[in-house]
Amino acid sequence: MAERTEEDVPVIYLHDIKRQYMQGETPLTILNGAKLALWAGQSVALVAPSGSGKSTLLHIAGLLESPDEGEVYVAGTPTSGLPDVERTQIRRTEIGFVYQSHRLLPEFTALENVMLPQMIRGLKRSETIKRSIEILSYLGLGDRIKHRPAELSGGEQQRVAIARAVANAPRALLADEPTGNLDPHTADHVFQALMQLVKGTRVAVLIATHNMELAGRMDRRVSLVEGEIVELD
Ligand code: ADP
Ligand code: MG
């Protein structure tokens, strides 16, 4: 029998996730038993209407928010019982996040923005410079490393945000409508950068998107219906 490898367990597994928000006095159920496995090297599109809980699901998968019920497993480890410091550590090293707006630090260059998460993690400055230049070059930004966010185009800003998200070589990359603010041509370019990373690094990718054309080019498509994940196709 083949030996059990890391790839036998999902990078992230969401098990029976429930999440409610209070709307005044009434509870509003957003996620109601959502289950989803994300695998190394696989890209998954999350396509669902606004307000259906996509961002909530991504925040829970990224350990930015806790579910009311259910469990988030990261590489097979249940995370709900972990102390905050350990959850933060897992989030920093195993998970990268990309938002609709780039959220780069305006005072810092592209290079410094990508260096920062690595410095926080404790890598040596010289090492973070080397790695950051490599990642930015891989994403076609080798000649933009000294630019500040305001000196970059929308697509370039988003690619720097992606470089920052993968700076610590996470196992999972979660992107919340990452091309939502971009024109179709630029969206395509940013999307290609994401897909290049999946194939090149075997990171697991979950992208919330309204763009059916881009979703169609990913490995798998899911939606949220009444708080549960359903497979599309
Ligand atoms: P999507 O990303 O699919 O548009 P969200 O996950 O952002 O959906 O939100 C799902 C629903 O939960 C929305 O109706 C939203 O208003 C509500 N919601 C999200 N975050 C909160 C919060 N912190 N407090 C109360 N309601 C929230
Ligand atoms: Mg959202």
Image (cartoon, grey):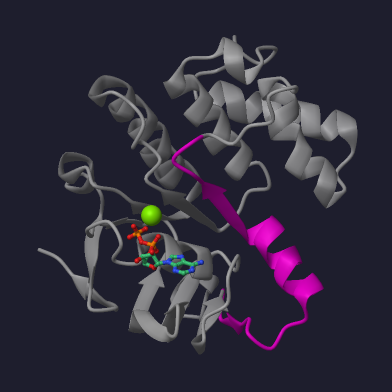
Q: Position of residue 224 (x, y in %)?
A: 25, 70
Q: Point out residue 54 in the picture as x, y percentages from the top left corner.
A: 36, 62
46 is higher (above) or lower (below) than 216: below
Residue placed at 66% from the left, 62% from the top? 91
The answer to whether one can see residue 17 in this image is: no
| Magenta-tinted stretch | 75-101
Q: Which of 200 and 155 lies nearest the eye of the viewer?
A: 155
Would residue 69 appear left or right of 126 to someone viewing this image? left
Q: Quadrant for ligand 2?
A: bottom left
Residue beneath the point at 88% across and 33% down? 125
On screen, residue 196 above or below 189: below
Report which quarter residue 94 is drawn in: bottom right
Residue drawn 31% across and 29% down?
187
As rendered, which of 39 and 28 lies closer to the eye? 28
Say which residue appears at 59% left-offset and 25% top-offset: 136
Image quarter where the C terminus lies is: bottom left
Where 85 falls versus 189 (above or below)? Answer: below
